[in-house]
Amino acid sequence: MEKLVSLAKRRGFVFQSSEIYGGLGSVWDYGPLGVELKRNLIERWWRSVVQEREDIEGMESAILMHPKVWEASGHVASFTDPLVDCRQCKKRFRADDERIKGKPGEESAQCPVCGSKGTLTDPRMFNLMFRTFMGPVEDAAAQVFLRPETAQGSYVNFLNVMQASRQKIPFGIAQVGKAFRNEITPGNFIFRTREFEQMEMQYFVKPGEDEEWFEYWHEERMRWHYDLGIDPDKLRYHPHGPDELAHYAKRAEDIQYHFPFGWQEYEGIHNRTDFDLSRHQEYSGKKLQYVDPATKEHFTPYVVETALGVGRLFLVVMADAYREEEVEGATRIVLGLHPSIAPVKVGIFPLVKKDGMPELARNIYKELQKLFAVFYDDGGSIGRRYRRQDEAGTPFGVTVDGQSMTDSTVTIRDRDTLKQERVSVDQLATYLTERLQP
Ligand code: GAP
């Protein structure tokens, strides 16, 4: 994990937020390569979930919503974690922190940080939602929340989207956007943060057909992760037991990845029944129902949700792609990212900075730039330039050498096999396009 964090910083994938001020707890910034990788992940998800399907519409709701939304959704009452404090060292923990010995509140319970006995308080419930105020007066009437999930924006817009897009049930609404949770114990780099991004899809179905759709999305989502090239041996499902289910869920299953710190969730598939739509009908007094055009039957749809964290997916693809290899007596660090998500697709290098090579390489760069994210590098030995792109996860390197100047061919180096092929400059775009297909 330390190696991954160090690479992430060194190569500009992820930086600590406000680092020059000592950082802000569990908040992270994405650097030049990180932002490209993140956008590519979102783009790949959006393409498969929205653009390649007739039955799913995209939307983007605001982060701030009417405060009643969060009463109706149950987040004000139930989006809580049990918290304990140590009276001795003043540290805070989740009551279910595995490091705590004994039962918090009892004399025998031991603080996992300072080791004191009998200093842990009884657990008390702590709401994870961030609050702020709307307008100049900071009183209870002006209090609003930063959303802890994008899902509620899709529920309150269920009728708007359905009518505007003329969809019929079953259909879905997808969103990508920021969410905020005042986590008690964030950590493990970008795994659990207080500000994060979600890619969520709410699929509205006829009650009674929810189990079937749950199975469908359960399969479909795992297939998506396989297609992204994630090692299948590091993926598994984790069904939620009754004590793990969120307040809205009838059934839930996580997709887990075997991170360097163990098996952990990064996507959830939830059967949320008609809980959210029914509660919004109750609290708003507005009907959120579907009328079957054939039978004229009225019903409140059930929802099967797929919820994936962008930052967690980012960590999965980085951890899965990272490898170290011995090549000609030296260690090579490679990020074997799937080409579709690699921040840079092709590195372009003149072998030396003379004899017309930089000019030809620049021309190739300008042409390929119209098609993909490319990077021009003429600094240092060719070996070092290859290694820099290996660490960035760049799938191909194009080198202009002496022969290029006589026969208009270049070498193409494959990041994974290290094989080099000679290709003519006019065939370069076709060659690379074929190999960079999603
Ligand atoms: N709308 C349902 C929902 O939000 P969740 O299981 O709480 O469900 C879905 O969250 C996904 O969002 C998680 O699988 C994870 O990838 C991501 N996520 C949740 N909390 C997070 C946090 N504090 N930091 C980073 N990602 C988080």
Image (tube, rainbow, N blue to C red):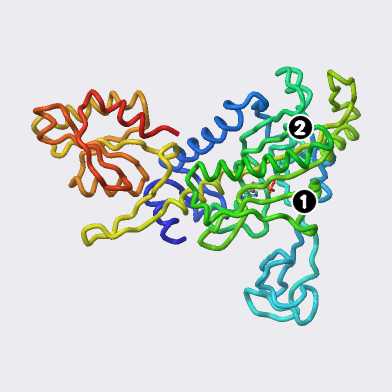
- The foreground one among 238 and 184 is 238
| Viewer-closest of 116 and 389 | 389
Checking the image for residue 366, the label placed there is none
Residue 264: percent from left, percent from top: 60, 57
Q: Amino acid at mark 1?
A: Ala
Residue occupied by mark 2: 204
Q: Residue at x 62, y 36 (%)?
A: 177
Q: Tell me the crowding category of disc 1: few under 14, some 14 to 19, or many 20 or more residues within 10 angstroms, Cα based.
A: some
Residue 150 in which image quadrant = top right
Q: Percent x, y for residue 140? A: 82, 42
Q: Read off the residue under disc 1.
A: 246
- The residue that appears at 65% across and 72% down in the rendered structure is 99
Secondary-structure class at tag 2: strand
Expressed as whole percent of the image width and height from the top left, the position of residue 395 reads 34, 41
Residue at 88% in and 32% down = 281
SS at badge 1: loop
Question: Is 361 displayed left or right of 101 in the figure?
Answer: left
What is the C-alpha distance between the residues marked 2 and 1?
19 Å
